[in-house]
Image (cartoon, grey):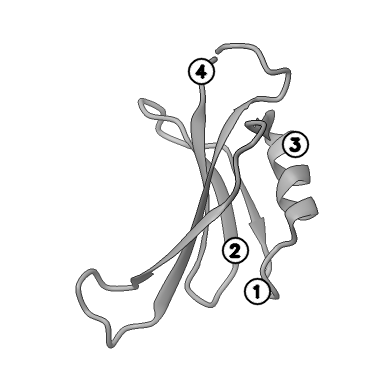
């Protein structure tokens, strides 16, 4: 089964969920206006719209980074990641 990594990030502005597809110039993505962190349901719905689903048994992991690499005085960027597959579960 071929899998990809879906990531979601925000630096305090809009949230962006995207699927990392190496070799492509534009990755499938969904944006949310600045608000609370998108719920699990909103993320699953966005992934389905993009043609993906969370791999059974996978869960979101969270980390933080600095907006400017290596400078922890800059705003925090929250990043979440989860393994996904094509929505129909087949290989791409």
Q: Between disc 4 and disc 3, whose residue precedes? A: 4
The residue under label 2 is: 15
**Sequence-earlier tag: 4 or 2:** 4
Ranked by sequence position, the earlier of labels 2 and 1 is: 2
Pair 4/3: label in front? 4
Check contact, mark 2 vs mark 1: CB within 8 A.
yes
CA–CA distance in space, label 4 to label 2: 26 Å
**From what the image shows, is residue 3 above or below residue 67?**
above
Q: Name the residue under label 4.
A: 2
Q: As drawn, which residue projects farthest toward the bottom?
A: 73
Residue 2, image x, y percentages:
51, 18
Question: Is 37 on the left or on the right of 9, as rendered?
Answer: right
State whether residue 67 is above or below residue 75: above
What distance separates the C-alpha of mark 3 from that of mark 2?
A: 16 Å
Q: Do the residues labelled 3 and 2 touch (CB within 8 Å)?
A: no
Q: Name the residue under label 3.
A: 49
* Residue drawn at (69%, 39%) of the image: 47
Residue sitting nearer the eye, 28 or 77: 77
Of labels 4 and 1, the one closer to you: 4
Residue at disc 2, secondary structure: strand
Quadrant containing the N terminus in the rendered view? top right
Q: Earlier in the sequence, mark 3 or mark 1?
A: 1
Residue 18 against residue 10 in the figure, above or below: above
Measured as percent of width and height from the top left, residue 83 is found at 54, 36
Residue name at image x 65 percent, y 12 percent: 90
Q: Mark 1 points at which residue?
A: 34
The Cα atoms of the two marked residues, 2 and 1, are separated by 7 Å
Please, what secondary structure does the residue beneath circle 1 have? loop
Position of the C terminus, as image quadrant, is: top right
Identify the residue shown where x is 58% and y is 33%: 84
- Element class at badge 3: helix
Residue at 67%, 31% in the rendered image:
56
């Amino acid at each position: 089964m071929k899998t990809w990594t879906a990531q979601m990030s925000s630096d305090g502005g809009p949230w962006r969920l995207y699927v990392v597809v190496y070799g492509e110039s534009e990755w499938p993505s969904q944006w949310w206006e600045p608000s609370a962190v998108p719920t699990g349901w909103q993320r699953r719905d966005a992934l389905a719209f993009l043609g993906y689903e969370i791999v059974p048994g996978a869960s979101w992991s969270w980390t933080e980074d600095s907006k400017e690499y290596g400078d922890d005085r800059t705003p925090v960027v929250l990043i979440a990641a989860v393994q996904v597959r094509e929505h129909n579960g087949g290989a791409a």
